[in-house]
Image: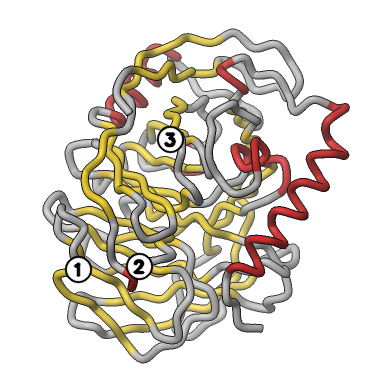
Amino acid sequence: MRGLFTAAVVLGAFVGGAVPAVAQEVPAPQPVCTNRESRLSELSGLVSDGERLYALNDGGTKTQVHVLGRDCKVQKVISAATDPYDAEDLARSADGTLWLSDTGDNRKQRETVALISLTPQGKAAVHRLTYPDGAHDVEALIMDRSGTPYLITKDMFGDSKVYRPSGPLASPGPTPLEKVGSLQIKETTTQGGPVGSIGSMTVTGAASMSDGSVIALRTYTDAYLYAVTDGDVAAALQREPVRVPLPNEGQGEALAFDPDGTLLSGGEGVGQQIRAVKGAASLAVEAAKSEGSTSGGTSAAGKDGAGSGFPFMQVGIAAIVLIGGFLLVGKLRKRRA
């Protein structure tokens, strides 16, 4: 699809309030390549070094990252015998180590979750983590420029929470997590995803520029970009984001940045495209300069930039749709108990 989308930099943070917006023109996602690899039928995590793509398949019985060319063909597989429970996202630290976010928990029953570090040579280590407030389902991992990981929960109606380790990661651990923030993702009209419009509020992935200057979260339908000041990810997530629509991805979960600031995205399923939005990171930087300050409250990404909260009369219906949709998605995925 060619053309331009209007992305909104929301200038307020009150759920349900009428919030003005400053519109920016954002290029529509353009195809990079088509994933025809049956080994990557559930693409969930993505990282780019500018030449290669590192792709994580949801599920599996061992730690694996597929290295792809820009044609989406697998060049090699980095693997280790470590068996993850439910790996959902992928990040890469400055030394080239890949980090798998083994944090999926659809039933919210895990006592611990884990980050799995995987070197380019295939050496893996498990770093177990515990939440301070019970189990959460997490599909989004951000690694800041210092190598500190941040986990963002996948919650109903976009009410996501942000956690990071309270100290250095231990192996095998567990290392306690601490809650460092929250954010509210609001409904949009961008088409796509497996659970209708409510999927536009559900955080399914994340990414970070290699220098840590911009981070991004995604839902099934949209990406939200935040400029980072002084390496402070928690503060950045309270800034009002630039919204980049990612329409018509069947189950969009993968998100990455090229080193030049191009945003990459992809969805589950053989035949799905990896797409690119050039110059996306610079939009967040420019928006932060225009805004002049961060908000002091809960971040909100508004419907069509209007900042309208999720309509009260639709909550009951939406809850039924969400629960039914997640149950359907859960059945389609082969999870181990």
Q: Earlier in the sequence, mark 1 or mark 2?
A: 2
Of 315 and 85, nearer the camera is 315
Residue farthest left in this picture: 51
Residue shown at the point (11%, 53%) measured from the top left: 51
Against 208, residue 244 (above or below) is above
Of 162 and 321, nearer the camera is: 321
- Which residue position is annotated with label 1? 74
Q: Secondary structure at mark 2?
A: helix
Circle 2 is placed at which residue position? 40
Are the two marked residues, 1 and 2, in contact with CB atoms closer than 8 angstroms? yes
Secondary structure of the residue carrying numbered label 1: strand
Image quadrant assignment for residue 153: bottom right
Q: Which residue is mark 3?
A: 246
Residue at x 27% of width, y 85% of height: 123
Q: Amino acid at mark 2?
A: Leu
Amino acid type assigned to the residue bearing label 3 in the image: Leu
Mark 1 or mark 3: whose residue is earlier in sequence: 1
Q: Is residue 216 above or below residue 33?
A: above
Give me the C-alpha separation between circle 1 and circle 2: 9 Å
Instruction: Report if the CB atoms under discs 3 and 2 are less than 8 Å apart.
Output: no
Residue at point 18% right, 81% down? 121
Q: CA distance from mark 1 to mark 3?
A: 24 Å
Image coordinates for residue 260, horizontal then vertical, percent: 17, 37
State how far apart marks 3 and 2 are (Cα).
20 Å
